[in-house]
Amino acid sequence: MSYLLRLIVTDRPGILGAVATALGAAGIDIVTLDVLERGHGVAVDDIVVDLPPGRLPDTLITAAQAVPGVTVESLRPFAGPLDTHRELELLEALARAAEGTSVKLLAAELPRVFHSGWAVVLSATGDDAWEVAAASEAAPTFEGLTLPWMPLTRPRLMPSEEEWMPERWREMALEMMAASYGGPGCAVVLGRSGGPAFRRSELLRLVHLTGIATTVASLPPD
């Protein structure tokens, strides 16, 4: 089974190699590794790993934190594995997509790019009106909700304690972030249950990707 392990590590040479060695000694295979943030002497890394059958998830925490300078921020099951260069592959797929299908493709593929659980694309239909243009598997229902941040005017991190969220979402510790896509006031929303919370670096990456995706999706076919 695959898991997403988020680590906060001392930013020093060789520490990721030490983590890889510790996980390997415990029989744990690393599938992908993403460095999310670096600064002030620390780094935040997302590592997708495969846990051998019969091994408890606590094994991951024990192995990682055996390395001095490593703290496990969160651990959760993950529906992987992921491919490298997945952002470029998504943009290429959007460029080849048939007319009217790009928004569904974006919603379906973004969760794998950002280690999230689901994605929803919201389209503004008026000053205070919007509709769900596309949604990935596992996405919660947005219809009927009051979204005070729609139409979207700026990128947003939306932690699970925000007051507009339904109580059941807060109980699920649903973490979200949103960025513009496709037109004025429209948005892509990514979410995952149980954390970890999205970081500013992930939001900036989403803003960059959706900006390019908006342009790519509007290009004429070859």
Image (cartoon, grey):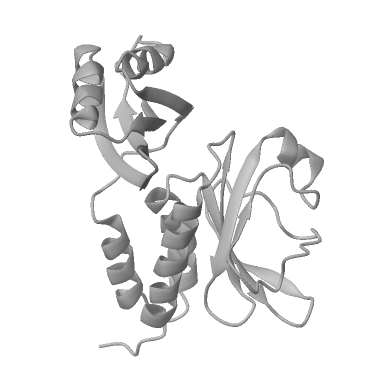
Q: Residue at x 47, y 67 (%)?
A: 207
Residue 166 image position (x, y, % from top left): 79, 46
Residue at the image point whose x is 25% and y is 33% from the top: 12
Give the answer, above or below, for where 179 lies relative to 195: below
Residue 184 location, quadrant? bottom right
Extreme residue toward the front, this view: 40
x, y percentage for residue 115?
A: 43, 44
The x and y percentages for residue 176 are 60, 50
Q: In this view, does 5 lie to the left or right of 81?
A: right
Q: Is residue 211 above or below residue 53?
A: below
Quadrant in which the C terminus appears: bottom left
Q: Quadrant of the N terminus?
A: top left
| Location of residue 134 by image quarter | bottom right
Judged left or right of residue 190, residue 54 is left
Q: Which residue is drawn at 25% across and 35% down?
A: 31
Q: Where is residue 26 in the image (x, y as percent from the top left)?
A: 25, 12
Q: How many badges with numbers are in the image?
A: 0
Q: Which residue is drawn at 21% across and 23% down?
A: 18
Q: Is residue 169 left or right of residue 182?
A: right
| Residue 29 visible from this viewpoint | yes
User: Residue 218, located in which quarter of the rendered image?
Assistant: bottom left
Looking at the picture, tell me which residue is in the foreground, 10 or 185: 10
Q: In this orientation, does residue 4 appear? A: no
212 up-or-down from 56: above or below? below
Nearer to us in this view, 94 or 46: 46
